[in-house]
Amino acid sequence: MRKDVGYFEGTDSTLLTALVCEGYDTIPVSNGYDNHGRHIQLINQENKPDLLVGYVHKVFAPDDGDPNYTTYQDIFHTCRTYGVPVLLEVPRKLQAKARALFDDVPDVVQFVDPADMLKVALGILGHPSK
């Protein structure tokens, strides 16, 4: 059975294409704002992706006080609860600043330089080395 990689809208198409070519399925996931795919809060033990990838701005949304919108805490909670690794694509020089945007970043979340995304993703997915 092929493993699933969930992705937020706008994720690098080259990365997604490479993952498909390496034998993985890509599944759109909504952050609650863009309605792009399955809503992150509907993920459960039965339908969870094996990996979730995206950009920081898809996870870090302004806190406008609207209780109907998904916060990064909601996203992190879902991923931590179901053991879904999260790769957030951030240039190396901005990773410390990106991490500082979030309180209590769980172990399942990694900030990864764009040049390393495919390698890190394949490693998490258990892809055999070539």
Image (cartoon, grey):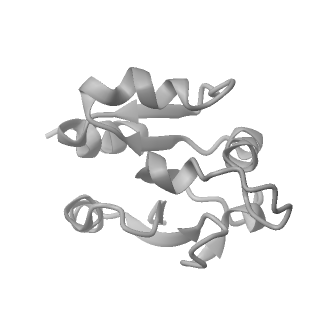
x, y percentage for residue 127? Answer: 32, 44
Name the residue nearer the viewer: 112 or 123: 112
Name the residue nearer the viewer: 101 or 106: 101
On the rendered structure, is 59 left or right of 14?
A: right
**Residue 70 position by quadrant:** bottom right
Q: Residue at x 23, y 42 (%)?
A: 114
Name the residue nearer the viewer: 85 or 23: 85
**Residue 128 seen by the camera:** no
Q: Residue at x 13, y 40 (%)?
A: 130
On the rendered structure, is 63 left or right of 110?
A: right
x, y percentage for residue 109? Answer: 54, 34
x, y percentage for residue 89? Answer: 35, 43
Q: Residue at x 75, y 49 (%)?
A: 74
**Residue 66 position by quadrant:** bottom right
x, y percentage for residue 34? Answer: 56, 75
The image shows a total of numbered marks equal to 0
**Residue 115 seen by the camera:** yes
Vertical arrangement, residue 92 with respect to residue 61, above or below: above
